[in-house]
Amino acid sequence: MCGRFTLRASPRAVAEQFSLLEPPPLVPRFNIAPSQPVAIVRLEPDSAQPRRQCVPVRWGLIPSWAKDPAIGNRMINARAETAADKPAFRAAMRRRRCLIPADGFYEWQHTGSRRQPFFIRLRDDRLFAFAGLWEAWEGPEHSAVESCTILTTAANDLVRPIHDRMPVILAQTDYDRWLDPAIDHSETLRPLLGPLRSNALETYPVGVHVNRPGNEGPQCSAPAEEESGE
């Protein structure tokens, strides 16, 4: 799964990586948690000549048919293997795919009653994109909420000792294909949704500061010995 991640990169770096017309108004974030606003990159909806835009949405997808938006709290992730068939994600998988900029994510390893957080990133600490889906939900009095979910896949050899699932990290060369609204067949997209190779990633334990969703700052992703001051 993916329950926390980081986006520490500069707005200019995000604009360059995702071919945006201008840098988005972002600040560095070290502990992005479910239900919080997250930046997604998508093609402009309902545009004759769609271009990429970066917009904030709620993390935790609320299906358009939902009666209660609280359902989004259980929809932070979608299994890549089954998203095209699940009622909550099926329409978004066909028509509302997005890129979710990130530069690291956290997973917790369970050892007995102990939960050790680990930070996972690319070896060169570059910016990357999770494969995501977005949805629009209309509430009472026509209040609109846009939300998203992160697709997950089986963990690679590096992540598996920590957790059996990991987020889908897309190659930059696949961004256009993932966003292309003309592609609505899940079999065409399936080759994009496997785990990133282990040797592209690195991981290390971090301190418990990251456990609280309200905590922010570089301390969240600092190696455990630095976080503890050892």
Image (cartoon, rainbow, N blue to C red):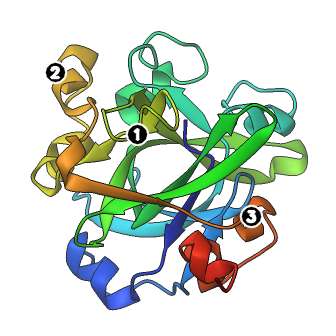
> Residue 144 at x, y = what percent?
73, 52
> Residue 220 at x, y = what percent?
64, 74
Q: Which mark is nearer the camera, 2 or 3?
A: 3
State the residue position of label 2. Answer: 188
State the residue position of label 1. Answer: 159
Label 3: state its secondary structure. helix
Which quadrant would residue 43 be assigned to in this image?
bottom left
Q: Which mark is nearer the camera, 1 or 2?
A: 1
How far separated are the C-alphas under marks 2 and 3? Answer: 41 Å
Kind of residue sitting beneath label 3: Val
Asked whether, in this view, residue 191 is left or right of residue 157, the answer is left
Spot the residue most to the front: 230
Label 1: state its secondary structure. loop
Q: Do the CB atoms of the residues marked 1 and 2 lie less than 8 Å apart?
A: no
Kind of residue sitting beneath label 1: Val
In this view, 207 is above or below 225 = above
Q: Is residue 19 visible?
A: no
> Residue 99 at x, y = what percent?
36, 53
Q: How many marks?
A: 3
Q: Residue at x 81, y 49 (%)?
A: 142
Kind of residue sitting beneath label 2: Thr
State the residue position of label 3. Answer: 208
Q: Residue at x 53, y 28 (%)?
A: 78
Q: Quadrant of the N terminus?
A: top right
In this view, 113 is above or below 131 = above
How far separated are the C-alphas under marks 1 and 3? Answer: 19 Å
Which quadrant would residue 194 be assigned to in this image?
top left
At label 2, counting other C-alpha atoms closer than 10 Å, the crowd grade (few under 14, some 14-19, many 20 or more) is few
Q: Earlier in the sequence, mark 1 or mark 2?
A: 1
Q: Residue at x 77, y 26 (%)?
A: 66
Q: Nearer the viewer, residue 128 or 49?
A: 128
